[in-house]
Image: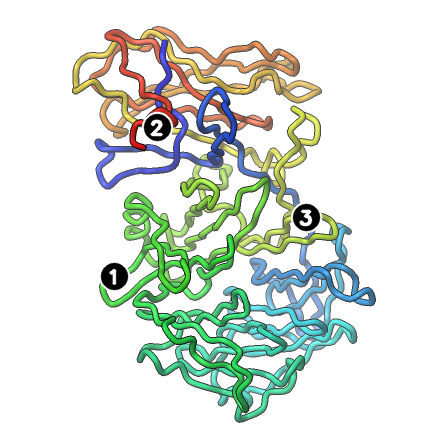
């Protein structure tokens, strides 16, 4: 029995006969010591309902909507304001969340926000939050707990798509325009009429605006450029010489900060649907041909929405496509720690998959909470990686009570199309982590968590039945996940999946076959030879 390259990223090529790998609701971690393998698969976090934004006040015209349109947090605020603050928008209602207390928030009447059920843009300052919602602009005073409309005349009576904060100035960008504005210093309610400029170094409209490391990035449809605070008056920002990039942005809300850089879904005069990372002022491609092929097949990508978060040393760029897969959506994650992609999805009651149930994120340092807003309901979830001590602490092993199906589809097993007889296949995983009390079968008897195996001998077009093995109730750490007498094939793809609420951690997989399958060397050995 020998090891083969089972653990890997999602990579479904244009031709599944070339590669049909898939990693769903697992992510890879490179082991940084001399472990059993080079990589392991670890489970993505589940979701726990935390805030249900269900406020309705007909007198003020306030009501929640079908989704959480915006979510933002600020940490290390003043002692009077508290160390952390989080706010959210659902429907036309603005919510100030009470940190650390589930389903506890204040609603700020009497001003309803303009509502198009699309994402809002929010920017925290020291004492204010600036909001752009469906083209209109609002300012929330954190100390006075009131919200007010910012007159559209401040923005040439044109809709505003995005807002930001840099060096004490609030910033606003007109929709379908290259015009942007800077507020008075530390005052989101005051916008001097002369403190405005147009991006003129390229002729297109600005699609997205984002601030990173005290620099304002203006991403056009075909080009991008970066500004800095020069201290000039009346408009304080100027172009950084040498920052013009021949790469634009295909989706306004795809730009996000991570790993001391920014990431975005790109487009230019030659095409679109590539994900880029800024390396200084040089865009660096981080997507691969497989995900680019998938994105090219989506009905629309201009509505893509991204957020980033960091946990356990992994920085994830999570990209949600609402229009993919006939409206069910799709979610792709890039891990900056490994440079690899995986998929995330929500298992519907009919057995189909839709996109992961989040599209915005806020991290609250005070309570060490990752909060995410749902694109399909008015709920904010707490998202966290469960604890590492087996079944204890696994309150996040489901998506708010719904099972999480995890799936790994292996590379092809192929010996130049010769017959291979598959005697035994084993998945090396952390066994014996069943919950206490144990899972029950249909007759009420205790059962093991189940791992499922199926395979395809025709490049992923048709599949065998599923075959189940138990992986051990709590404490049965020596249990092995083994399948035997698996037939013969000229090419084969194995796929394992699971949905029981335990910490599914996969280390490797081994195959016994005739003729002896030429297992791949460990990656460290390959790298040593290459060096």
* N-term-proximal mark, 2 vs 1: 1
* Residue 150, placed above or below residue 108: below
Q: Which residue is labeled 1 in the image?
A: 271
Sort mark 3 into few (<14), some (14-19) or many (20+) by Cα contacts within 10 Å.
some
* Residue 54, placed above or below residue 442: below
* Residue 33, placed above or below residue 44: above
In the image, 342: left or right of 313? left
Q: Which residue is labeled 2 in the image?
A: 528
Q: Residue furthest front?
A: 531
The secondary element bearing badge 1 is classed as: strand
Q: Are marks 2 and 1 in contact (CB under 8 Å)?
A: no
Q: Residue at x 59, y 83 (%)?
A: 183
* N-term-proximal mark, 1 vs 3: 1
Q: Which residue is labeled 3 in the image?
A: 369
The secondary element bearing badge 2 is classed as: helix
In the image, 136: left or right of 37? right
Give residue 220's quadrant in the image.
bottom left
* Label 2 to label 1: alpha-carbon separation: 38 Å
Q: Are marks 1 and 3 in contact (CB under 8 Å)?
A: no
What is the quadrant of the N terminus in the image? top left
What is the quadrant of the C terminus in the image? top left
Q: Residue at x 48, y 74 (%)?
A: 161
In the image, 58: left or right of 5? right
In the image, 122: left or right of 523? right
The secondary element bearing badge 3 is classed as: strand
């Amino acid at each position: 029995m020998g090891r083969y390259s089972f653990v890997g990223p999602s990579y479904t090529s244009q031709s599944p006969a070339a590669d049909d790998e898939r990693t769903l609701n697992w992510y890879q971690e490179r082991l940084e010591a001399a472990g059993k393998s080079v990589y392991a698969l670890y489970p993505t976090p589940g979701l726990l309902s935390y805030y249900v934004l269900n406020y309705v006040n007909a007198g003020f015209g306030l009501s929640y909507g079908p989704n959480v349109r915006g979510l933002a947090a600020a940490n290390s605020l003043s002692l009077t304001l508290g160390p952390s603050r989080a706010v959210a928008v659902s429907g036309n209602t603005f919510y100030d969340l009470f940190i650390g207390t589930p389903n506890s928030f204040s609603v700020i009447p009497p001003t309803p926000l303009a509502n198009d059920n699309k994402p809002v843009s929010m920017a925290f300052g020291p004492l204010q939050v600036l909001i752009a919602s469906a083209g209109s602009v609002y300012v929330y005073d954190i100390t006075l707990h009131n919200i007010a409309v910012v007159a559209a005349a401040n923005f040439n009576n044109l809709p505003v798509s995005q807002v930001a904060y840099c060096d004490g100035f609030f910033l606003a960008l007109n929709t379908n325009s290259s015009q942007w504005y800077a507020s008075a210093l530390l005052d989101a309610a005051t916008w001097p009429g002369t403190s405005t400029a147009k991006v003129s170094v390229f002729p297109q409209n600005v699609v997205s605006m984002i601030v990173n490391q005290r620099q304002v990035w203006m991403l056009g449809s075909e080009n991008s450029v970066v500004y800095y605070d020069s201290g000039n008056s009346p408009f304080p920002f100027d172009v950084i010489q040498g920052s013009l990039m021949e790469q634009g942005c295909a989706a306004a809300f795809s730009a996000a900060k991570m790993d001391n850089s920014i990431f975005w879904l790109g487009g230019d005069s030659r095409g679109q649907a590539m994900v880029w990372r800024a390396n200084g002022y040089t865009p660096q491609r981080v997507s691969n041909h497989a995900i680019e092929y998938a994105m090219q097949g989506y009905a629309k990508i201009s509505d893509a929405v991204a957020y980033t978060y960091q946990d356990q040393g992994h920085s994830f760029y999570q990209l949600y496509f609402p229009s993919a897969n006939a409206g069910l959506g799709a979610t792709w994650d890039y891990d900056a720690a490994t440079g690899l992609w995986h998929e995330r999805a929500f298992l519907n009651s009919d057995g189909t998959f839709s996109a992961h149930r989040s599209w915005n994120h806020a991290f609250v340092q005070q309570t060490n909470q990752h909060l995410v807003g749902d694109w399909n309901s008015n709920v904010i979830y707490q998202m966290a990686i469960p604890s590492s001590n087996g079944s204890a602490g696994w309150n996040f092993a489901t998506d708010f009570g719904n099972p999480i199906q995890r799936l790994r589809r292996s590379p092809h097993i192929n010996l130049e199309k010769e017959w291979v007889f598959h005697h035994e296949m084993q998945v090396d995983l952390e066994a014996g982590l069943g919950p206490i009390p144990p899972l029950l079968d249909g007759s009420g008897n205790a059962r093991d968590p189940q791992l499922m195996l199926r395979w395809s001998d025709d490049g992923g077009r048709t599949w065998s039945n599923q075959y189940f093995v138990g992986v051990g109730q709590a404490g049965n750490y020596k249990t092995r996940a083994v399948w035997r007498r698996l037939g013969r094939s000229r090419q084969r793809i194995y796929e394992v999946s699971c949905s029981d609420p335990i910490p599914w951690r996969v280390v490797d997989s081994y195959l016994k076959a005739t003729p002896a399958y030429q297992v791949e060397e460990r990656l460290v050995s390959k790298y040593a030879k290459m060096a």
